[in-house]
Amino acid sequence: MAEAYPWQDSLWQQLAGRAQHAHAYLLHGPVGIGKRALAERLMARLLCQKPQGLDACGQCKSCMLLKAGSHPDNYVLEPEEADKAIKVDQVRELVSFVVQTAQMGGRKVVLIEPVESMNNNAANALLKSLEEPSGDTVLLLVSHQPSRLLPTVKSRCVQQACPLPSEAMSLEWLAKALPDCAEEERMELLTLAAGSPLAAVTLQAQGVREQRALVVDGVKKLLKQQQSPTQLAESWNAIPLLLLFDWFCDWSSLILRYQLTQDETGLGLTDMRKVVQYLAQKSSQEKVLDIQDWILAQRQKVLSKANLNRVLLLEALLVQWAGLPIRH
C-alpha cells in the first residue's frame, strides 16, 4: 500500500470518491509533499477489483499483482536514470501500451513522474494518448514544476494542486518520522526543505545540517578574506549544487528584504542572521539585485541539467559574493 499522509485526507476523499474518473490527472505541487504516494494510492484504487470504501482492498488478484510489480494493466514511466530526461522512445512504448485492451478486463492505469522531465518531442508524442486514451485508461501525471509543462499537456488534464501541509502538521509528522532529532533540529530541517516534510527527511539523511554548517563557515571566512573563492569552491565538492544555489538565492532575498524593511525578525535561520544583516548594511541594493538575477539564472541552468563546470560556476558565485560589501 502506498503511504497515506494526514495532510492529504480531504484531497484523497475528493479524488477517490469521484463517481466518474477523468482520463488524465495532473497532480502538482512542491517536491517532498507525497504526490507520488498519492498517485500510487489512486492507481491501486483504480485497478482494485473490490475496493473497500475509498481504498484498494489489498487482497484481490489485481492488488496482489500490483504489489508484486507485475500487473499487466499498469505502466509506470519515469526517467531511465535519475535526473535525466524521459525520452521519446519511452513515450512511444507507453503509447503502444495505451492502445492495447486491458488484460484483466478492468482499467489500465499509467503513472508518469516527473512529467516535466519529458523533452518536447516526448511530450508531443504523448498528446494523442492524453486527448483520447483508448478503452478505460487513466493517466496520472505527477509534476514538481508545472510551469515547465507544455500548455497542450496541461489543458488535456484535470489539474489538481497538492497542498503543502501546515507547519504544525509537518512538525507533528516529523516528530514520528525523525524521533531522534531534537524539536529545534526538526524545525530547522523543515525550514531548509521549504516546508516539505518528506524533503526534510531526505535532507536529514543526506547530512544537510553538517553541509550547511560547512558552507556558512566558508561564507564567513570569505567575507573576512581568510579563504579565497577557489579554495572554497573546491572544499564544497560534496555539496549538491542545487542546494548551494537555493541557499545563496535565499540569502540574497533576505538581504534585500532587510534593506527594504529593516525588520530584524525576517533575517532567516540563526546561522546566517548576522552575515545577512552585515551585507544588507554594507552593500548597494543594485549589486544585490544583480547578484540575485545572476543566481536565479544559474539555478535555472542547474535545474535544467545543463552541462556546467561546477568549480568555475561556484568560483564566479563566490567572487561576486565577496564583492558585495563596499570596502573603504
Image (cartoon, rainbow, N blue to C red):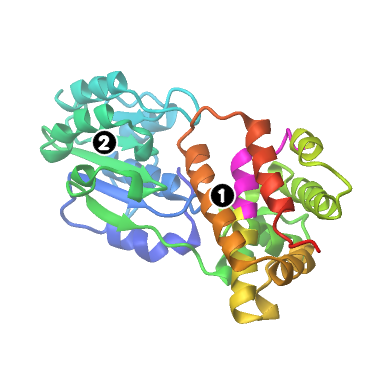
Vertical placement of 108 versus 204: above or below? above
Q: Position of residue 263 (x, y in %)?
A: 66, 81
Quadrant of the image occupied by residue 309: top right
Q: Secondary structure at mark 1?
A: helix
Amino acid carrying mark 1 in the image: Ile
Vertical placement of 59 versus 90: above or below? below
Residue for badge 2 = 109
Between discs 2 and 1, the one toward the N terminus: 2
Label 1 CA crowd tier, 10 Å (few <14, some 14–19, many 20+): some
23 or 55: nearer the viewer: 23
Label 2 CA crowd tier, 10 Å (few <14, some 14–19, many 20+): many
Viewed as shown, does residue 55 lie left or right of 177?
Answer: left
- Gap in angstroms between the C-alphas marked 2 and 1: 40 Å
Give the label, 2 or 1, closer to the camera.
Answer: 1
Q: Quadrant of the C terminus?
A: bottom right
Vertical placement of 282 versus 134: above or below? below
59 or 175: nearer the viewer: 175
| Residue at the image point whose x is 25% and y is 33% from the top | 123
Q: Dominant secondary structure of the magenta stretch?
A: helix
Amino acid carrying mark 2 in the image: Val
Question: Is residue 325 inside the magenta stretch?
Answer: no
Part of the protein shown in magenta? 236-248
222 or 109: nearer the viewer: 222
| Residue at the image point whose x is 49% and y is 62% from the top | 6
Residue 271 in view: yes
Residue for badge 1 = 295
Q: Quadrant of the N terminus?
A: top left
| Residue at the image point whose x is 20% and y is 31% from the top | 124
Viewed as shown, does residue 307 lie left or right of 224?
Answer: left
Q: Position of residue 44 (x, y in %)?
A: 34, 41
Q: Secondary structure at mark 2?
A: strand
Q: Position of residue 320 (x, y in %)?
A: 67, 49
